[in-house]
Image (cartoon, helix red, strand yellow):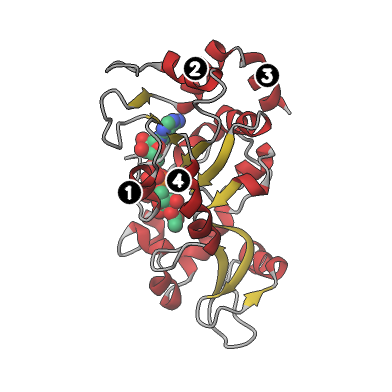
Amino acid sequence: DFGSDLDIRNLVDWIQSGNKAKKIMVLSGAGVSVAAGIPDFRTPGTGLYDNLQKYNLPYPQAVFDVSFYRSQPQPFVTLAKELWPGLTHSPTLTHSFLKMLSDKGLLLRLYSQNIDGLEYLAGIPDEKLVECHGHFRSASCIECGTTADPESVKNTIIKDVTVPKCDKCGGNVKPDIVFFGESLPDRFHQMLRTDVEEADLLLVMGTSLQVAPVSMIPDMVRCEHRVLFNREPVMKIRTGKDLFLPGNCDDQVMELCSILGWKQDLLEENAK
Ligand code: OAD
């Protein structure tokens, strides 16, 4: 037992002990990609939801709302062209740290809410990743669910900047990212059921925990200790059980890796 004052050295101890943290579950959000130059959603001023004026939305989240997309698809189409994962952004130190956890056999699963594809670019294996809010690699009709050809959907959005239509029913097609009003991928529910039982440590990184059901994960895990990497204390920090590492996650990851003796490896991993 570590008493009431957990610090980053306790986290190092758990990882180095070889048995206290060998199935690490990670829950990530937009904050882990901010250092790559991708704004998050809710940070006042810089977050995406404060910068959608040109779309004349009734409320910012409407751009990701399935019923809004049914009647007014153009704002999302225009935004999707800008957000489409490409090769302009590189994985951050935090992504590289998660890849290292995976390489060392310490990562149980990464639950990412992000749709920027940086986990993939960092080389985190598919099997270790749960894309809670979907991805841009496939697309389907919001009315009948028929899958659409991903390449032609991409072209329609990126080149024509118009809404892709379903061949079968004429409904609006969108990439398979999860909108408000839609359910999360089956894989999310399937993996979560056993992962919350098996995880021996939870890292929560760069998420405001404002969106359900992902926001419930910190309360679902059975493990004793949880570590929050965030600019703000977005969850209740239980004395003696949870550790809050405030500030930019890359800085805390660097500090952690320095103490672990992983700093050189981290920098090399990130330079790949
Ligand atoms: P948010 O923008 O809601 O939260 C990002 C969190 O990361 C905030 O608490 C920031 O303070 C923190 N943060 C920002 N930069 C950071 C940094 N460099 N280091 C550490 N923390 C940092 O983003 P999410 O929680 O990911 O859904 O948002 C959840 C979902 O809401 C998204 O997946 C998206 C959105 O609507 C869909 O689009 C379906």
Q: Which residue is mark 2?
A: 12
Q: Which residue is mark 3?
A: 265
- Mark 2 and mark 1: Cα distance apart in space: 29 Å
Q: Nearer the viewer, residue 182 or 193?
A: 193
Q: Which residue is mark 4?
A: 197
Dot label at residue 51: none
Q: Nearer the viewer, residue 92 or 259?
A: 259
Question: Which amino acid does the dot numbered 4 rest on?
Answer: Glu
Q: Position of residue 4 (x, y in %)?
A: 27, 18
Q: Circle 2 sits in a helix, a strand or a loop, which is it?
A: helix
Task: Choose the circle earlier in sequence order: 2 or 1.
Answer: 2
Q: Is residue 132 visible?
A: yes
Q: Residue furthest bottom?
A: 169
Q: Quadrant of ligand 1?
A: top left
Dot label at residue 210: 1
Determine the residue positioned at 54% across, 83% down.
144
